[in-house]
Image (cartoon, grey):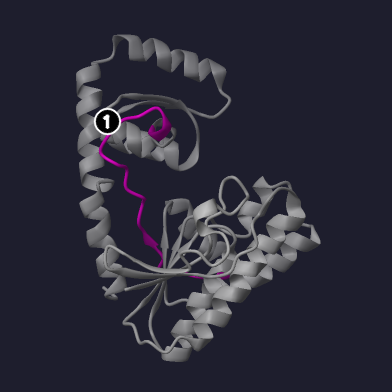
Amino acid sequence: MFVVTGIPNYPTGEIYEEYKGKKRRDEIIDGVKIHRCLTIPRKTGPFFRALNYYSFAFFSTRYIRRLKEEFDVVFINQLSPVLMAKAGIVYGRRHKKPTVLYCLDIWPESLIEGGFTRRSFVYKYIHRISRIIYRRVDKILVTSPGFSDYFEHEFGIKGTMYLPQYAEDFYTPDSCRKVQAYLAAGKPIIASADGITRDTINAAGCGYCSPADDVSALASNIRKFITAEKDSLSKNAREYYEKNFNKQTFIEKLEKALEGK
């Protein structure tokens, strides 16, 4: 196994002291060889963020072009931006190896959250790039069923595989931000949300979910929750987690995807 990644600079926007200069560019952790490509820190503002994005895409691809080792499969852990997938795709095509992309942030839709409109030049430009990148991998894994619909509608890509991220088997204030963490902790859930959050809560039978911004429906669900059988909701939450979001299930599904099954 060989990992090509960037130099840690998130979330502070500055490269951490232990990685400055050429420190720890190449190392082995738990038997895994790691190479960290030159990356311009994101600092603050759109200018440096763009430099950060493009610097990793450029330097990682340049490094990959010189990489002689042979591997069985390429796995791309795609966060933001989608450009980060370029190096993996280049290696896969040059060495004729299957390429699997795990999409955690869908592009160019992520630009909408950043304030861009679908009519903007930036959105249209990144849309073209995203289409090229996504269509050049052999298999796409998605963290949300809604991503599958998006890929088919926007890029004509079918056959994506749903692989939700697993939740660690503990409960802390930070991990509460994800529904999976509540499920792992066996916690009943009251939520005001749409999409995958709503679908998960309903499928698990672990609580009540009202449409986003529907105050009346939320108040009604709170009243229902007061008299609900909370032990039953807790049991449902934990059982749904064990079946869908635990680490072992995640690894087994990922291995099958990497094996082309």
Which quadrant of the figure has residue 101? bottom left
Is 245 on the left-hand or right-hand side of 104? left
Amino acid residing under circle 1: Ala
Q: Is residue 117 visible?
A: no
What residue range appears in magenta?
155-175
**Residue 27 location, x and y as percent?**
39, 68
The correct choice, above or below, for 127 with respect to 242 in the image is: below
Q: Which residue is drawn at 27% across and 35% down?
A: 184
Q: Which is nearer the eye, 239 or 171?
A: 171
Q: Which is nearer the eye, 45 or 32?
A: 32
Which quadrant of the figure has residue 182? top left
Query: Is residue 161 one of those drawn in magenta?
Result: yes
Q: Which residue is drawn at 62% across and 53% down?
A: 110
Is 167 on the left-hand or right-hand side of 125? left
Q: Which residue is drawn at 42% across and 27% down?
A: 209
**Residue 139 location, x and y as percent?**
41, 72
**Residue 2 location, x and y as percent?**
36, 74
Badge 1 is on which residue? 185
Locate the N terminus by quadrant: bottom left
Locate the C terminus by quadrant: bottom left
**Residue 216 location, x and y as percent?**
53, 15
